[in-house]
Amino acid sequence: MHNYATYPSLAGKVILITGGATGIGAVMVEAFIKQNAAVIFVDIQKEKGDALCEKLAHELGRTPVFKHLDTTNIDALQSFIATISQSHQRLDVLINNVANDTRHSPLDIDQQGWRDCMAVNLDSTFFACQSAIRLMRENRSGNIINMSSINVLIGPKQMPGYVAAKAALNGLSKSLANQYGEYGIRVNTILPGWVATDRQLALWLTTEADKEWQKSVALRGRLEPIHVANMALFLAAEDSAMITGQQFVVDAGRT
């Protein structure tokens, strides 16, 4: 049992997490709930989103707000974010976690496949930021955390679209941080390593792949979603009040 930090400044904060039903997103939802934040999350996977809400209600006695939503439907995404100003009066933190790292060949992907990859990995993040900044600017306070990946640093094969999109998020975060800092809005990026989510374990993080990964890192042991969530908590809290436009790698020393 780990005794992780408690951040008093997160209590009561309104947090929106995209892609929050599974993996890193689900662990972040739980981590912020444990900090007594008001958590809202969206995801295309309705059953898993509902199941997470039931689990947290049973285990913690608190339930996040879940909206079944496809973030590539920009109109629906932005409309929902706009409603937060009525339902919660403000939006304090946006975490753009939604992503799809399905492998694809650089020579085989067609124009629609490329656009689909950008739609989920890049476009939805930008337009979520756009809507969130409109709310945050009114309150002259806000915090955006965009989830990138160490894949932009190591350039793995069979992932050109995903890597390009995640690299773009680094530049996007820097630009938004510089433009909206005058309104008290901070924007940072987290670059996780190979996190042992259910999806990764089912599709790619095999026993052999894990052995190779362990050879390449400084810290032995599995990189778990909570390790990434803990960084998100710190960046969302007032403990990091003067940090913006930065990239934070959580990869056990892989890079």
Image (cartoon, rainbow, N blue to C red):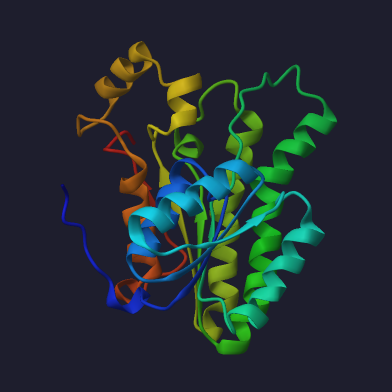
Relative to 173, 8 lies left or right: left
Looking at the rendering, which quadrant does residue 7 occupy? bottom left
x 41%, y 43%: residue: 192
Front residue of 175 and 183: 183
Check the picture and name the quadrant holding the C terminus.
top left
Query: Quadrant of residue 18 in the image?
Result: bottom right
x, y (%) of residue 163?
A: 58, 36
The residue positioned farthest toward the bottom in the image shown: 139
All told, the count of numbered labels is 0
Write the residue at 52% across / 79% down.
181
Taking the image as shown, residue 60 lies to the left or right of residue 131, namely left
Kindly give the residue lying farthest to the right in the view shown: 111
The percent position of residue 146, horizontal first and vertical second, equals: 52, 56
Residue ranking furthest to the front: 58
Question: Residue 196, how many percent across, how many down?
Answer: 38, 32
When the figure is inspected, residue 131 is found, relative to residue 141, above or below; the finding is: above
At horizontal 46% and vertical 27% (from top left) the residue drawn is: 200
| Location of residue 201 with respect to 181 vertically, above or below | above
